[in-house]
Image (tube, rainbow, N blue to C red):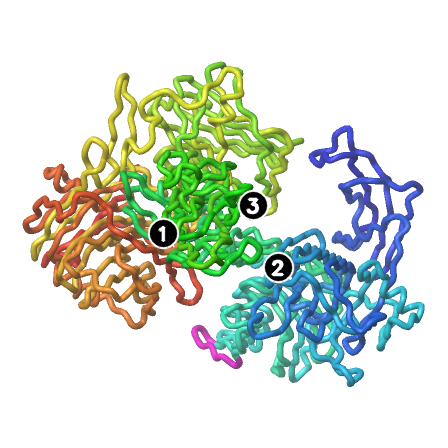
Amino acid sequence: MKTLCAVYLIGDSVGGLPGLARVLGTFPGNTDTDSVVQHKLLHSIRTRYLRLVPLEGSPSGGMGLRLEIYGCTYKSDVADFDGRSALLYRFNQKSTSTVKNVISLRFRSRQAEGVLVHGEGQRGDYITLELQRGRLALHLNLDDAKPQSSGRHTSVMSGSLLDDHLWHSVLIERFNKQVNFTVDRDTQHFRTQGQEDSLEVDYELSFGGIPLPGKPGTFLRENFHGCLENLYYNGVNVIDMAKRRKPQIYTGNVTFSCSESQPVSVTFLSSTASYLAVLADPGMEGLSLRLQFRTWNRDSRLFYVPLTHGPEPASLVLQISEGSIQLSLRGPPQDTTQVFTGERISHSPGQSICENQSHWTRSCNLSLLTGSCEKPHAGYQGCLRLIFINNQPVNLGRIQQDRPANFSQLSFDICSIRDRCVPNFCEHGGVCYQSWDNFLCNCSGTGYTGATCHNPIYERSCEAYRKTGSPAGIFTVDPDGSGPLEHTHVNCTLADDKIWTVVGHDHLQPVRVQGSTPRSPYVLIFNYSISPYHLRSLVASSEHCQQKVTYRCRKSRLFDTWDGTPLSWWLDRDGVKRTYWGGILPGVQQCSCSLEGNCRDMNYFCNCDADQDVWVNDTGLLSYKDHLPLSEIAIGDTNRTGSQALFQIGPLRCYGDRFFWNSASFFAESSYLHFPTLQAELSMDISFYFKTSAPSGLFLENVGVRDFIRLELSSPSIVTFTFDLGDGPVVLTVRSPMPLNDRQWHHVRAERNVMEASLQVDLLPLQLVEATPEGQYRLQLNSQLFVGKRSSPFSKIINGMTFDLNERAKMTPGMNSGCPGHCSSDSLCHNGGRCVENRNSYVCDCTHTAFDGPKCRTAISASFERGTSLTYALQEPFSVMRNQDAKQLQSGTYTESVKSRENVAFGFLTRHGPALLLTAQSNDQRYMAITLTQNGSLQIWYRLNQERGPDTFSPGSASLADGQFHWIRMNREGRELYVQVTLPLFPSSLVAGTDITDEEVLRAGSRGFIGCLSSFQFNEAAPLKAALQNKGSSLVSIYGRLEESSCGITSSTNTLTTTHTKSDRGNAPLKKAAQNDSALIGGEEPQEATLLCTMFSRNDAQ
């Protein structure tokens, strides 16, 4: 860069150059790749952003920039480590134990491996900071090394590509078990595992390596190669003390300067247009090549040498193929010899550096005949450096200056490869994979789906499962949806027409107590089956919670009869001591018999306080939610002769969802609710219901300095989702064929993350737009969130957090809590039925459910004989695929989880196996099938790739062909398969496709299905319901006799358990299945059919 202009900005504005911009000056630069030009400013400036405007490039062509900006009064203490050196900081005492540590340093590394900091104690404590494959790893252990403490250490990785010869900063802050780990600008907050909170280190801390005790110059791990700057440990400047030869510091082969220059690299920017031609001496008889490369791409051509010319040319090609180095000798057309195939470039099984790592990797030496060079036919995208041909270095700077025709679309002097997985935008433990241009998230096994693993696949509560038609049983719930809490298992039971969430603990059996005193009470601590965070979320979101305390006593008092001192007590969820007992109000030291007026002795408030030599009972329910669940109990008056106590603490039981019908009504056009600023910098999902008669209205809005987000009803039939990240507004619009201001409830869901944004209204087509790869990705808001104008929203959920509209509306003028109408009552329509308001009543629309009746509670069932089958032509008017235009469909850029999914639910009863329950087939012979094996166990089949055999998922080995009624619910999104079945089953397993044939599915179908099927749902279709209620429908084809039946059930109350599995072949996601063209339910395959029973889906609707 010969000349450039520098402009700095005052404040936070970064768009354009408004009045806040100030010109710093014009500065001449260097004219070659080696010299450095320095400029000192006359006056210091304070700014967040600096813009550089090139004014004049190099006379020889090309333009590049390498810039270092220095702050004021900067002190630099540097130490250089050559891989055989270390600094030892020795303590004044034998060992030191600390609850607080602060370590800060800057480093520049020459290699991808090496220890920067290490300290350990004799009892097993240690701290280690080291480079591993170009990333920084921090290892901490605060517990001893006893066998029972194994697995208590904590390891955290941060940063990437840190062996790039550039300076990087590190800050480690620890206080007790809380740790902040910052690499450059990326900070991770975590807690150490185990019980201890102090770090005990013996003798010394080492920097640059881990020396072996008693053997100077011998090290246990790979040493650090590079420079450290401004190394501080708990406020001590270690390098400064070493330079001043302080006795606390041992210096081994360390120099206090850092003069090594960075190797010259070249970046190939385009996989189709970038190349570098290096001329070789035609007179040479052989060729040797040595280089280092770094890339993300699995398939690339590194080097190409033509050996002969003419009608049958030959060439030598060095390339990366499927993550492995491959050397090929190519002759005439279709004549290729593999000279050498190396192992996959990997540091762990199944993980190629071309997938998720990027390392400087050395190739082997080649000795071959050579000829002239030419432009390669296949491209390489990545970086090269230290290129040697016949042991002579290639001068990249000379090529850049003197031979511009020998290269195209290259960037010299620096490796500009970017790690798109740091920071990791994949949420909830999703694994990030990347190429040069983009990244994707593998959500397998996380319980979440979507482009960034943001969306939960599980319902939030037992009440939510009930509304979808699922019967009671063991369910996986995600109480905060897309929030930080992980999913967990709970027991959902049906009693008194309520669905109860039941959470057990580890002491459900009765406990007998003797020999305890108030000073030495018997104490029992309860550990629940879900975490304290899940317990708190469950209690807060439930309408009612209770816990039964059964307490029987004999000569054992609860309270001292003289002064009322508690002799027994319990602790609530926060560890606060409580002295009231079941059935009484908080703060009152009494028992339920006092409230009911039936105590055994009315002189006392508890039966036990009568202190009689007979067994009496003080059992009751604890129901004050803020104190639940009980975490500990103490019994203290059983040390007298004949004294005993017998208690039993029941599970926590909760019902209802107090946020589901959490609604507010807006009467004035200017009325609105306000909430704290929306925390949605990287990802956000919003879902709510609304009804209105107004032609337009604002649902929500939140703004920042430049950024904003807005969701509104822009016209009677249009919902608009608009946001701006600073580089222009993005607008998504859903247009309804019918007016939305019809005073009926409508559902809206909007989502935005770093990869895409989407908007859906009711069952209308999903609108989706992808983010630009190099655009802004942080949504920065700072004002209050405003909700609602001229509409009545309810159950508004943002990023898993429910906004309490009801309570906020009570305090806001021009608003009412709740919404008028019959459909504002809970549980009116069941099994997914839609409540429709009439003038003086309501009706339940069961069209898209597999149920019938006034409230969608009547199951539709049918019996199948041998030879009976049902074929249904699926016509899904709101298929996800129809939301994409032709260009998007051809590019296939939308996320797999959005395009490929099935939701299947049904009940069945049979005594026969093998049997085919369902198959869905596309016109290109891709299919999915649900079968029972010979022994009655369940199998789910998927063949989504024509080039290999089907995948089969076996949720368990228990027989379902036992004459009992069973429910199956199955959801697949992309690669994730989620199955619920009536019986407890073993964990899901995957059988490789090479061991399975389509004939096995055919055999199951040829035996037919004999039994009863009920409430069959496939996505939005209810085939069994259509066959029985619309027998003249052109969508239905029936073979044999199909008769309506009750299947011997009255309601869906069977117990379900959950299994969760995924495809594991080659760590590749299940590919998108084509829209199903043909499928069939139950029964025997017709002779003329080519594949079993089928259920068709047509894509002819436009």
The C terminus - image quarter: top left
- Cα separation between marks 3 and 1: 32 Å
**Three-letter residue code for mark 3:** Val
For label 2, the residue is 274
For label 1, the residue is 614
Residue in the foreground of this view, choosing between 573 and 727 = 573
Q: Secondary structure at mark 2?
A: loop
Q: Secondary structure at mark 3?
A: loop
- The location of residue 215, given as percent across then percent down, is 78, 85
For label 3, the residue is 576
Q: Secondary structure at mark 1?
A: loop
Mark 3 and mark 1 lie on one chain; the one further toward the N terminus is 3
- Residue 338 within the magenta-colored segment of the rendering: yes
Res 1064 quadrant in image: bottom left
Residue in the foreground of this view, choosing between 770 and 507 = 507
- The location of residue 1084, given as percent across then percent down, is 12, 58
Say above or below: 266 vs 994: above
